[in-house]
Amino acid sequence: MPWLNPLPALFLAARLGAGDPLPPLPQPPTPAVTPKYTELDPATGLHMTGTPQRIDLAGYRLRVTGKVLHPLALRYDDLRRMPRLTSREVIACRGYFEDYANWAGCALTAVLDRAEPRPAARQLELVSADGYRTTVTLQEARSGYAFLAYEWEGKALPVLHGFPVKASFPGLPGNKWVKWLVEIRVE
């Protein structure tokens, strides 16, 4: 399929322990102007999709629910303490744009391993704070390339592009890269 991205080069960094201090990653400001759908964001050079959400880190939890042995409610720093991946990726929205950027986050497999999907699980429904939902197969989620991005170009993910967490699926179209991720429902 021509819209598929080539498989990424993911780089794994050292894992932080539960008591290790995390480097600060300040909450990004909300921009004064939001570009229209698929317009270029001049601050990042990325195209805008979705309805920007302002999510307070103090109350943020990424819930992992559904057909799992251990439902989870992960804080932002819980994700940042997992092994860190970095990758240069293209987000391709066929017929609209291709955006290239450096992303960092944790492997989706690390989160799924903690939750332990039940044998009957076949897919994930990804839920955004703006109400957007999409699904990926459990096989796609466990590909080794899927990750939960919380950084863009070495900084906290911009508000317009998914802060605090964006699901990243290299090789899949951009509509699978869910911004403002608040729930992963295992089905």
Image: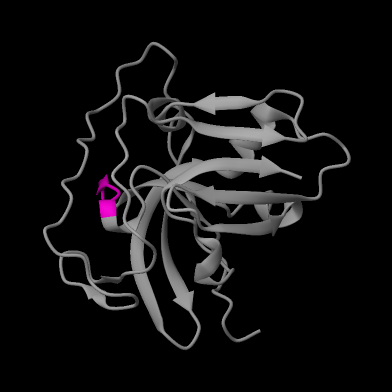
View extreme (front): residue: 131
Instruction: Please identify the quarter of the rendering in which residue 186 is found.
Output: top right
102 or 65, which is in the foreground?
65
Q: Position of residue 72 (x, y in %)?
A: 60, 26
Q: Which residues are magenta?
A: 154-159
Task: Indicate whether residue 158 is drawn in magenta.
Answer: yes
Q: Position of residue 45 (x, y in %)?
A: 23, 71
Task: Indicate whether residue 133 is drawn in magenta.
Answer: no
Q: Is residue 177 above or below residue 187?
A: below
The residue positioned 40% from the left and 79% from the top of the image is 98
29 left or right, relative to 20: left
Q: Is residue 185 above or below residue 9?
A: above
Q: Quadrant of the C terminus?
A: top right
The residue positioned 88% from the left and 37% from the top of the image is 119
Q: Does the image show residue 153?
A: no
175 or 18, which is in the foreground?
175
Total of numbered circles in the picture?
0
Q: Position of residue 97 (x, y in %)?
A: 39, 82
View extreme (right): residue: 120
Q: Position of residue 26 (x, y in %)?
A: 19, 35
The residue positioned 77% from the left and 25% from the top of the image is 69
Q: How is the image coloured?
A: one colour
View extreme (top): residue: 19
Q: Is residue 20 above or below residue 97?
A: above
79 or 50, which is in the foreground?
50
Q: Quadrant of the N terminus?
A: bottom right
Q: Is residue 39 above or below residue 172?
A: below
Q: Does the image show residue 99?
A: yes
The residue positioned 25% from the left and 76% from the top of the image is 40
